Image (cartoon, rainbow, N blue to C red):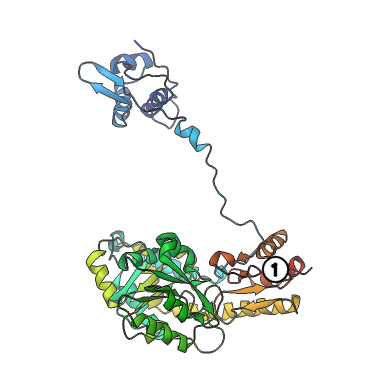
Amino acid sequence: MMELTPRLDLHSREPLYVQLYSFIKQEIETGKLTPYTKLPSKRKLSRYLQVSQNTIEAAYEQLVAEGYIEGISRKGYFVCKIEQTFSTLKESVMYIKEKAYENNVTFDFTQTGVDYDSFPFAIFRKISNDLLKDGNEHLLRIGHPQGEYEIREAIVLYLYESRGVRASPSQVIIGSGTPTLIRLLFKLVKGSLYAVEDPGYHRRLVTFEKGDENVRLVPLDDDGMMISKLEDSNADIAFVTPSHQFPCGMIMPISRRKQLLNWAQKKDGRYIVEDDYDSEFRYSGKPIPALQSLDCQERVIYMGTFSKALLPSLRISYMVLPKPLIENYHENHFSLVQSVSRLDQEIITKFMQEGYWEKHINKMRVVYRKKRDVLVSAISIYFPDSVEIIGLDSGLHLLVRPNNGMTEQELIERAEKYNIKVYPVSEYGQNDYQTVLLGFAALSEKEIHTAIQLLAKAWIR
């Protein structure tokens, strides 16, 4: 009888059959058990290893199921011929190094953060506990593809009151972040040429998804996307951030908005994607109505998110589609499964219906205005004559151009020496490589002041 000599540990938490299965599998993978080799019978191996035949049978059955051995009636079990790899899985994993994600810096001017101390944990905990009581089995089932009706209804009411957006809940689609919804949008407007702001947030995503040949980069002036350049692009879909252009911060005036709408209405199939990502936070003047509120021809696709005002990790965004596109969605893509958990949707619904959302927004406007003011004040103190600030009227970030002769990369590297992380603008297409982005939501007022004082040491020669 061919001898198998596994080291079976009777005191291990791992069952004996799993230990035997793993041993034989490794022997086959390393070539020690060659193809067509006959294995000992269950009775003989059981007696030899002094374990039950059930243990041997369970190990053999698992090996058969995975294709390592095969059982032939009245003949026994034989090793199958399998392709040999250069290394086993365990050896291969040793070569994969996990890439670090967290930034080990003291001051991080990220534009994706929020004021975490202001997050309403107690309210979220209460709502979650109420929802997870017995009797809410509906939360365990897959819900409506567009998102639950109640959250879409709450969003429509909020958008009408705060942004002037006109829509019905049936036109709203919920998704796990803006990129997810944009990928769905591509399915609805196939074969189009896409115009993106240059510089702009959508440049990388749209180019990655559709390719350089299908994307047109449209430059900006002080009022936003230049309509004459948009006309020259022959694009069908234009991505814009009119209420707070990212990253430059300008607000598109009413005259440019009407020009943009006229562009869309000149040709069938043209649409404007309005990304209203942080419109809740405007620090001077009256709120600017959404571009969608001016649209009478069903040409604006409105997009919003809870990431900026509430919590980035929540990953809930929404899209309001014009009637022709929602009909396309219902006819061709209604079978797609909703990407946001039903529990998270229910929590946000209750949060909005019970008035917490409005209170939170009002509170955060005050918090972020103070942080913006501290940032601007600190810059004026420590950079009295040598810094230009861009886009400070709204949103959760601004641009800084020190005008000290340093390139963008030099500014970033010098800041890192003081344990400060600032962000490049060039990755959004900005041609001026002497400007960096500072987000201020995640830092405290004290941290902002200290960080700017250190940046002065880093950047003033």
Residue 315 pos. (x, y %):
43, 64
Looking at the image, residue 366 lies above or below residue 178: below
- Give the image location of residue 180, x and y in percent: 39, 63
* Viewer can see residue 435: yes
- In x, y percent, where is residue 99? 55, 49
Determine the image quadrant of residue 14: top left
The answer, for residue 275, to whether it is visible in the render is no
Q: Residues within 10 Å of mark 1 (few under 14, many from 20)?
A: many
Q: Residue at x 62, y 67 (%)?
A: 109
Whether residue 105 is situated above or below residue 300 in the rendered picture: above
Return the residue at label 1: 451
Is residue 250 placed above or below 407 in the rendered structure?
below
The residue type indicated by label 1 comes to Ala
Question: Which quadrant does the N terminus fall into?
Answer: top left
Residue drawn at x 31%, y 16% as measured from the top left: 38
Please, which residue is most extreme toward the top here? Answer: 1
